Amino acid sequence: FGTEIVLVTEPGNEAESITRLARIGYDTVSGYLEGGFEQWQNAGEEVDLIIDIEADELAMDLPHDPKLEILDVRKEGEFGEGHVQGATNMPLNKFSDILSIANVDAERNLYIHCAGGYRSVIAASILKRQGFHNLRNILGGFAKIKETEGISIVK
């Protein structure tokens, strides 16, 4: 798939979004939708959603969901400094490679996180566009996860 990006952000967040995307290798932003999401919705365009959860919800689901997979989209170095036991590392910059995405099991319940929550939303959006539906974005990312009881962190 192509990597052309059109942003739909909160009005005023366009420049920050472009800068953050460029830092992780997405430098082909074609523009942004003036008026953001509200404009999109008012135009009657198709809307989908990504479910956000708190880290404590991940802790509650871990022992009970055999199909649960944690997808850590931080860079390899960040992952190496500490990660959730059993997590799969797939840095966000790999999401531009369709073969990398093909290795993700669409039958799993994917709990996606990065360091603080920005990259994971992008990753979840890309997976959603590729037909994945069992997605959960962990709010606050690894910063919140490592503060949460019941989640094993390893190096």
Image (tube, rainbow, N blue to C red):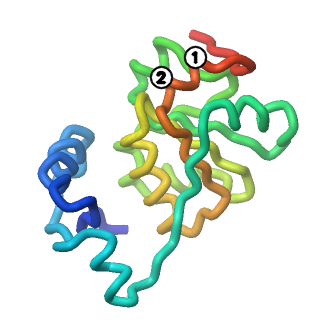
Residue drawn at point x = 15 percent, y = 67 percent: 30
What is the quadrant of residue 31 in the picture? bottom left
Q: Are marks 1 and 2 in contact (CB under 8 Å)?
A: yes
Query: Helix, strand, or loop for circle 1?
Result: loop
Nearer to the camera, 133 or 28: 133
Left or right: 137, with 95 as reference point: right
Give the vertical position of 69 relative to 28 (above or below): above
At label 1, which amino acid type do we have?
Answer: Glu
Give the vertical position of 105 relative to 117 (above or below): below
Which quadrant would the N terminus be assigned to in this image?
Answer: bottom left
Q: Position of residue 107 (x, y in %)?
A: 74, 57
Residue drawn at point x = 71 percent, y = 50 percent: 109
| Alpha carbons under labels 1 and 2: distance apart | 7 Å
**Label number found at residue 58:** none
Nearer to the camera, 134 or 52: 52
Residue drawn at point x = 78 percent, y = 33 percent: 60
The residue at which mark 2 appears reads as 143
Give the vertical position of 35 relative to 132 (above or below): below
Q: Position of residue 11 (x, y in %)?
A: 20, 61
Q: Position of residue 15 (x, y in %)?
A: 12, 51
Q: Is residue 84 visible?
A: yes
**Label number found at residue 147:** 1
At label 2, which amino acid type do we have?
Answer: Ala
Left or right: 138, with 42 as reference point: right
Q: Position of residue 3 (x, y in %)?
A: 28, 62
